[in-house]
C-alpha cells in the first residue's frame, strides 16, 4: 500500500526539480535579454544625432597633435568619442560584455591610433588614468590581430 506522505514527498521533490530547471532557463533568458538590451543602447547612442555629429567632425579632424585636433574638431566631440570608447572598453575589460563582441563592434585600434595624441594630452592635463581602458582595448585588439595574422601566414 502507498503511503500518502510518500506521495506528497515525491511530488515535492518533482516540484523542486521542475522549479530549479525553470529558474535556470529563466536566468539564461534574462542574460540574453540583458545583452540584447545593452547592444540596443549602444546602437541608439552610436546613431544619435549628437554622436553622428561627433563622428563626422572626427572624420574631418587632423590628429597629428592635440592642438591640431582641437582646432579641427570641437572639444565636446573629442570628449564624446574618447569617453564613449573608454566606457565600452571598460565593459570589455571588466567582462560585463564579451571582448570579441565589443572588438567586433568598434574599431578601438584605429580610433585610438588616430586620437592618441589628444588623449595623451588630456591625460597629462587632467587625470593620469584618463582613457586607460580605451588604450588597453586598442592594445589588446592590436595584439590579437597580430597573433591571428601570424597564425594565418
Image (tube, rainbow, N blue to C red):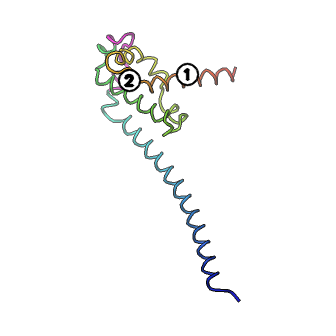
Does residue 93 show up magenta in the picture? no
Q: What residue appears at the point 38 percent right and 30 percent down from the top-left corner?
A: 84
Please give the label number shown on residue 4. none
Q: What residue appears at the point 41 percent right and 32 percent down from the top-left corner?
A: 87
Q: Are marks 2 and 1 in contact (CB under 8 Å)?
A: no
Up/down of 43 relative to 145, above or below: below
Q: Which residue extends farthest bottom?
A: 1
Q: What residue appears at the point 39 percent right and 10 percent down from the top-left corner?
A: 64
Q: Disc count in the image?
A: 2
Q: Callout 1: 10 Å neighbours few (<14), some, many (20+)?
A: some
Query: The C terminus appears in which quarter of the rendering?
Result: top right
Up/down of 6 relative to 78, above or below: below
State the image quarter where residue 8 is shown. bottom right
Residue 49 picture location, percent across and down: 31, 33
Up/down of 16 relative to 86, above or below: below
Magenta part of the chain:
54-68
Q: Main secondary structure of the magenta part?
A: helix
Please give the label number shown on residue 130. 2
In this figure, which residue is indicated by the disc labeled 1?
142
State the image quarter where residue 115 is shown. top left
Does residue 56 show up magenta in the picture? yes
Up/down of 67 relative to 52, above or below: above
Between 60 and 100, the one lying in front of the other is 100
Residue 86 picture location, percent across and down: 41, 28
Between 109 and 140, the one lying in front of the other is 140
Closer to the eye: label 2 or 1? 2
Judged from the image, the secondary structure of the residue bearing numbered disc 1 is helix
Judged from the image, the secondary structure of the residue bearing numbered disc 2 is loop
Residue 13 picture location, percent across and down: 61, 72
Q: What residue appears at the point 53 percent right and 36 percent down from the top-left corner?
A: 101
Amino acid at each position: 500500500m502507498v503511503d500518502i506522505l510518500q506521495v506528497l514527498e515525491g511530488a515535492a521533490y518533482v516540484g523542486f526539480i521542475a522549479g530549479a530547471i525553470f529558474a535556470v532557463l529563466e536566468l539564461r533568458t534574462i542574460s540574453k535579454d540583458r545583452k540584447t538590451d545593452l547592444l540596443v543602447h549602444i546602437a541608439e547612442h552610436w546613431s544619435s544625432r549628437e554622436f553622428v555629429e561627433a563622428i563626422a567632425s572626427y572624420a574631418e579632424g587632423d590628429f597629428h597633435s592635440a592642438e591640431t585636433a582641437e582646432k579641427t574638431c570641437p572639444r565636446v566631440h573629442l570628449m564624446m568619442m574618447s569617453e564613449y570608447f573608454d566606457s565600452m572598453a571598460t565593459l570589455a575589460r571588466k567582462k560585463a560584455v564579451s571582448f570579441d563582441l565589443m572588438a567586433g563592434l568598434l574599431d578601438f585600434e584605429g580610433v585610438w591610433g588616430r586620437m592618441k595624441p589628444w588623449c595623451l594630452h588630456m591625460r597629462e592635463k587632467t587625470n593620469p588614468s584618463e582613457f586607460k581602458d580605451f588604450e588597453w582595448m586598442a592594445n589588446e585588439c592590436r595584439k590579437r590581430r597580430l597573433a591571428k595574422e601570424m597564425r594565418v601566414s
